[in-house]
Image (cartoon, rainbow, N blue to C red):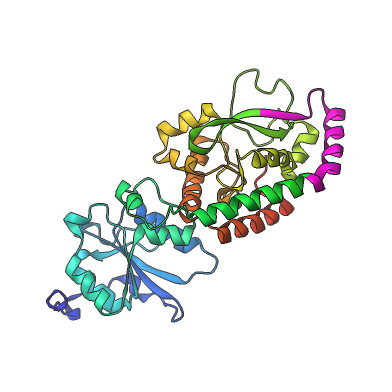
Amino acid sequence: MNALQSTVSSYQTPATTRRRWSPLKKRILILGSGKLATDLCQVLLSKRTRLFEVVGFLDQDSRRVGERLVNPGIIGTYDQLFEIVEHYGVRTIAICLEDRRAHLPVQTLLDFKAMGLDVVDGHHMYEEESGRLSIDLLRPSALIFSTGFKRRAITMGLKRLFDIGAALTGLLLLLPLFGVVGMLIKLDSPGPVFYRQMRVGLRGHPYMIWKFRSMSTDAEKEGPRWAETQDPRISRVGRWLRKTRIDELPQLINVIKGEMSLVGPRPERPVFVQELRERIPYYDLRHTVRPGITGWAQTRFRYGASAEDAHVKLQYDLYYVKNMSLALDLRILTETARVVLLGEGAR
């Protein structure tokens, strides 16, 4: 292996090696020091059950060695890849380079792969560990040649049958609750029980969503805006409806009509969609599946109330669109029950 002939003795041990490493965790080295590299490191460090220990980053520029990015920092250059892997006992190398053609040490990585080390794509590892896609640095080719985004006819057919059966059953069982909620809304504030609003659905087609009214009838007299924490437009009963997510239950009607699914990306209003399309890459990919009453983003992220929140939520939505399956739907429905019971993320 010609690429691995550099001697370990020529490698200068950095101060960070004095750290005690756990023998039960895989040591990972991140090749690169850009946004994807630091985002991946933060995800790995934030996990409750940490299976990896990040030994550090490598950068092309030797002048940056010693610079602290997250924790740890840059511990060497690409030329020192072999020596650093040997010295730290690295078992996984995550490739997070922004320009692989110019800098990727291909031969050394191939040698490591042949020796049994895990050499993984940084985007893929970020997706697997965080449950979302890093869209800012994602190249279109990564989506085009991805093994995800499959739409098997049998899966989609079973998903639709489950949606119809569950929605019909839910409406029948919830009729008494609907009556009580309607009475409370009427007693609390003047106006209709139900609220209909235009949303963007499958393939970008608009439709009218059904909800229990949770705001005053003049809530948007000054125009549409994102919901806020302790939003003054929300009524007393409406606050409870949102906390328990009961205000979303009338959307079972939309499910029966084929405009929505039980599980999918939450639909947005046309005025916000137009804004988000211009600001967020790949935004329209979320419209390739039916929107849902609940979704992966709803179980993993707080209530979205800004374009910045929508940017993060899209990463979760695209993970769902890419990996959509009946098993994932079941997991989301189970986690939704937990979120509702704990009242997490509502506004």
Number of marks in picture: 0
Q: Is residue 275 placed above or below 323 in the rendered structure?
A: above
Q: In the image, what residue occupies the spot 48% across and 58% down?
A: 130
163 lies left or right of 130 = right
Residue 33, image quadrant: bottom left
> Does the magenta-highlighted stretch encompass residue 175?
yes
Where residue 173 sits: x, y (%)? 81, 48
Residue 101, image quadrant: bottom left
244 lies left or right of 333 = right
The residue at the far left in this view is 2
For the magenta stretch, what is the residue range? 172-196
Where residue 134 sits: x, y (%)? 41, 50
Where residue 9 sits: x, y (%)? 18, 80
Q: In the image, what residue occupies the spot 49% across and 31% down?
A: 273
| Residue 59 can be seen in this image | yes
Chief secondary structure of the magenta portion: helix
> Does the magenta-highlighted stretch encompass residue 220?
no
| Residue 69 can be seen in this image | no
Q: In the image, what residue occupies the spot 77% across and 44% down?
A: 171
The quarter of the picture where the C terminus appears is top right
Residue 330, image quadrant: bottom right
